[in-house]
Amino acid sequence: MITPPALLLSALVFTALVPPPCVPLQTSTLIAQACTHTPDRDLCLSTLRTAPEGSDLRGLTMAALKVANANASAVYNHISGVLKAATNSYEKQCLTECYDNYQDAMDQIEDSLAALETRGYDDILAWIASAMNDADSCEECFRAKPGYKSPLTEMNNGFDHLCTIVIATANLLVDGEE
Ligand SMILES: *[C@@H]1O[C@H](CO)[C@@H](O)[C@H](O)[C@H]1NC(C)=O
């Protein structure tokens, strides 16, 4: 016969083991899976947790794209300010290139958001790779000439890392299609 304390105990165990129905176990599993292969796992976890509860891989990809877009736009605005203040002509040349590149990167993210709607996951992979290239060639411009140092290294790396999160979730979407 089950005595009340035993009943209580089994109720507690049951509560501990079974997640409440409104918490999507699936989303956190997907997030953990996607973030395993990213260079900055904590950034990946916190970024994907901006997705609404119950998100599937597409929802996670959308969340990552939105965060990357906001970031690119913040970097773009920052460059605009630095460019106005710049006096050295080579530095201006690089900053102009960076400015154009981040404009392109934002376009590629916009295109990726549209591609997500039509399940064009390979397009997303290609466009985000290209956005990462944009950040990289911005950095490269300063590196190419002795005596110059990129004032945007941290931002370029930050944006690059956000892009790797999109790549991680989009890769899982591609895998799921095979
Ligand atoms: C872009 O995102 C990275 C990573 O979260 C962050 O370190 C950086 O400060 C962000 N840049 C801007 C300009 O918001």
Image (spheres, rainbow, N blue to C red):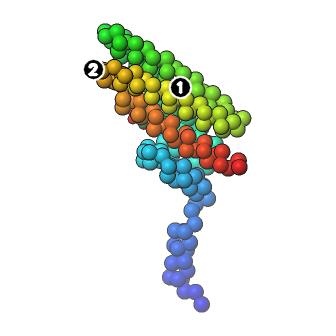
Residue drawn at the location 72% of the way across and 35% of the way down:
118
Q: Measured along the vertical axis of the image, is residue 24 above or below residue 123?
A: below
Q: Which residue is mark 2?
A: 147
Q: Give the camera-side residue of 53 and 10.
A: 53
SS class, disc 1 = helix
Residue drawn at the location 46% of the way across and 34% of the way down:
160
The residue furthest left is 147
Residue drawn at the location 34% of the way across and 20% of the way down:
145
- Which amino acid does the dot numbered 2 rest on? Gly
Residue drawn at the location 58% of the way across and 27% of the way down:
108
Q: Measured along the vertical axis of the image, is residue 75 above or below residue 89?
A: below
Residue 168: x and y in percent read: 55, 44
- Which amino acid does the dot numbered 1 rest on? Ala
- In the image, taking residue 98 as reference, residue 126 lies left or right, namely right
Q: CA distance from mark 1 to mark 2?
A: 27 Å
SS class, disc 2 = loop
Q: Which residue is mark 1?
A: 105
Q: Is mark 1 within 8 Å of ligand 1?
A: no
Ligand 1 located in image quadrant: top left
Residue 87: x and y in percent read: 31, 9
Quarter occupied by residue 157? top left
